[in-house]
Structure formats: C-alpha cells, structure tokens
Image: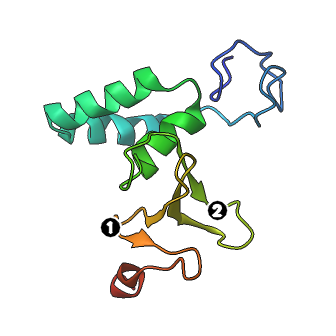
C-alpha cells in the first residue's frame, strides 16, 4: 500500500506512515472512485491542466490540497499557503494564510481579511 501523503510504500496494516507519520486513510470505495471519475470527465481541458500542474508541483497530498483548495496568495502571489483551521485564534479552513507575507483571505471569494476580524461577508450570504 502507498501513503496518500508522501507516496512511499508502507505495510498494508499500517495505521500511520513510518516515513511522514501521516495517518493512513482507507482506500476509496468503488463508489467514491466512480464519483471522482465522473467529475473529472465533466471538467474542461483548462481545469484539468491546472489540476495536473498542481499535482505535479506537489510533494505531498496536503500540499496538493492546499494548492487546489486554498490557492496562491492574492496579495503577493506566493504558493506557500495554508488554511487557518489549525490556528486556535482563527480556527477556520475558510481562511487562507500566506506563509510568506502573512496575508489572510477568504478561500471562498478571495476577499482580503484582517487578523483582527478574519471573517467574510460571503459566509453570511451563503447561509
């Protein structure tokens, strides 16, 4: 079996990866694989190319997820970004953070946010 985070071969019964210490995720079901296949078939060529580029540029699954779900910093263009779901002061995966310039933004609409009030108007609009 391969680690979904670092891609290295690990024992089939492993609960965590011995190389990167990521938790081992169960293999996707046939239903989940079919859903993804159908979604990919509906994507246009530009979106598929962008997805492939993000995959090729990523060393880990988390880095890939950050590239496609969070994207680059709207202020400085850096791809070294993360969500703020693990930040105890913000605690939201809908807030992106640039690890280079520190800018916060809404990952849903792209609005720049301030550290003092890291919430976005679009969240209330979508409720």
Picture residue at 15% right of the left edge, 37% below the top: 44
The one nearer the camera, 36 or 127, is 127
Q: State the residue position of label 1.
A: 109
Q: Is residue 44 above or below residue 8?
A: below
Q: Quick one: quadrant of the N terminus?
A: top right
Q: Position of residue 13 (x, y in %)?
A: 83, 23
Q: Does any portion of residue 28 appear in the rendered image?
A: no
Residue at (54%, 76%) from the top-left corner?
A: 118
The image quadrant that residue 42 belongs to is top left
Disc 2: which residue: 85
Name the spot of residue 119 as percent of width and height, x first: 50, 80
Q: Is residue 83 left or right of residue 75?
A: right
For this view, does 43 lie left or right of residue 124?
A: left
Residue at the extreme top of the image, as rendered: 9
Q: Secondary structure at mark 1?
A: loop
Compared with residue 55, is residue 71 higher up or lower down, i.e. above or below?
A: below
Packing grade of label 1 (10 A; few <14, some 14-19, many >=20) is few
Q: Residue at x 64, y 62 (%)?
A: 85
**Image quadrant for the C terminus?**
bottom left
Q: Find numbered disc 2 in the image and state the secondary structure of the residue it sits on.
A: loop
Residue neighbourhood size for the residue with mark 2, other residues' Cα within 10 Å, grouped as few (<14), some (14–19), many (≥20): some
């Amino acid at each position: 079996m391969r680690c979904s985070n670092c891609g290295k071969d690990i024992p089939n019964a492993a609960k965590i990866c011995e190389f990167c210490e990521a938790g081992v995720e169960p293999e996707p079901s046939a239903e989940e694989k079919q859903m993804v296949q159908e979604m990919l078939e509906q994507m246009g060529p530009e979106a598929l190319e962008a997805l492939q580029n993000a995959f090729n540029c990523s060393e880990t699954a988390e880095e890939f997820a950050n590239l496609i779900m969070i994207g680059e910093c709207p202020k400085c263009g850096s791809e070294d970004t993360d969500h703020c779901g693990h930040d105890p002061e913000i605690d939201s995966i809908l807030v992106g953070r640039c690890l280079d310039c520190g800018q916060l933004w809404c990952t849903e609409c792209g609005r720049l946010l301030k550290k003092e009030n890291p919430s976005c108007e679009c969240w209330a609009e979508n409720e």
